Amino acid sequence: MARKLSYAKAINEALHQEMEHDPSVFILGEDVARMGGDFGITQGIWHKWPDRARDTALSESAIIGLSVGSAVCGLRPVAELMFADFVTVCYDQLVNNAAKIHFMYGGEASCPIVVRAVTGSGIRCAYHHSQSIEPWLMNIPGLIIVAPATPYEAKGMLISAIRNNDPVVFLEHKLLYNRKGEVPVEPYEIELFKAEIERKGDDITIVATMRMLDLAHAAAKELENEGVGVEIIDPRTLFPLDKRTIIESVAKTGRLVVVQEGPKVMGFGAEIGAMVSEEIFEYLRAPIKRVTSLDVPIAFSPELEDYVNPTMDHVLAACRSVMSF
C-alpha cells in the first residue's frame, strides 16, 4: 500500500533500496557520508554502508572523474552535485568522457553513473546556486536528462536511472524536496523516456516540468471555470524526449503552451516548440507560446527573484492568448 512521503524522503528511500539491491552501487559527493548531504538526501546510508558512502573534496571535477572511472570498472556510482550550477566545473568529465564512452567503444564499455544535481530557484540562493541548467546538457548526445516532479516519480525514476547502463543527470528541484505524495513501500521502476499525461483536455496542451507543473495545474483549474479544457504533459525525461506523446496531444488540441523555469533563449521550450512546428504545423490553430523566466541572472533579492520567474498569471495570459485564435 502506498503511503505519503516527501520528495526528499522518496529519493532517500530509493538510494537505500538500491544500495541493498546491488552491492556495486555507491554514493559520493560533498558531505554525503556521515552528514547525510547538504539537503539531507543521503541520511542513514553511511551508517549502514560506511565503505560505500564517500565524502569527497570540494571538487566537482574529482567527483565526476572518480564516478566515470569507477563506472567503467564495473561499479554504479551515484554522485551528488550539491548545486547543479557547478556542473560547469566538471563539464569536461561529464560531456567529453561519460557521454562518449558507449559510442567510443562500440557498446563494449558503458558508463552507468547517476549525477544527482540540485537545480532551480526559489530559496534565495542568489546567482550561483539558483540556475535551471537543463538546456546546458540537453545538447549532449549520450547523456540522459531526468526531471521528476513528484515523490512517486522521484523514487521510481531514480531506481530506473541507477539500473540504466548510460550516464544519467537526475535533476532535483529544491522547492520540491518538501512536497509530499503517495509512494509505494516496495522498489519500483518508472520507464525513462516516457512522458506522463497529468490531465486530459481538448483545447490547449501545456508542457511543463518539475515545479512548473504546479503553475500549469493552477492555471488549468482557473481556465476550467472559463470552459477551457487544458491537457498537461510532464515530459519526465527531457532528453531523449518522448516526442510522440507531445505531438499526439497538440494534434488533438491545436494549441501549445510550454512552461519552463529558466531563460527563454535556447531553453527546452524552444526545442519543443520547434519540434511541434516541424512535425505538425498544419494542426496548429494558434502560435506556440513559451512561458519562461526572464533572460537575466537570478538575484538574491526575494522581490527580484520572484519578478524574474514565471507565475500562474503568466501561464493564464499565454493560454488566453492562444485561445483567442
Image (cartoon, rainbow, N blue to C red):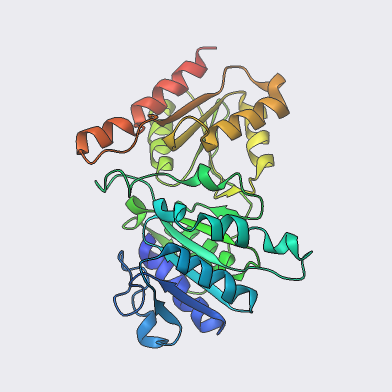
The residue located at (38%, 35%) in the rendering is: 218
**Residue 98 occupies which quadrant of the picture?**
bottom right
Q: Which residue occupies the foreground of this view, 161 or 68? A: 68
**Residue 114: x %, y % from top left:** 53, 65
Instruction: Please give left or right for residue 31 compared with residue 101 in the image.
Output: left
Residue 191 appears left or right of 44: right
Would you place residue 43 above or below residue 173 in this image?
A: below
Q: Nearer the viewer, residue 164 or 53?
A: 53
Percent from the top left, x then y, of residue 167? 60, 62
Frontmost residue, 188 versus 133: 133
Q: Residue at x 52, y 68 (%)?
A: 65
The quarter of the image holding the C terminus is top right
Q: Is residue 245 above or below residue 203?
A: below
Rendered position, 146 above or below 183: above
**On the picture, is 277 further left or further right than 1?**
right
Residue 6 in which image quadrant:
bottom left
Residue sitting farthest toward the top: 325
Query: How many numbered marks have been drawn onto this rendered protein structure?
Result: 0
Residue 148: x percent and y percent? 48, 54
> Is residue 179 shown to the viewer in this render?
yes
Which residue is more in the foreground, 215 or 278? 278
The image shows residue 11 at horizontal and vertical percentages of 43, 66
User: Which residue sits at x=68%, y=63%?
Assistant: 101
Residue found 52% across the figure and 42% down from its top: 135
| Res. 188 in view | no
Q: Is residue 126 above or below residue 317?
A: below
Residue closest to the far right: 106
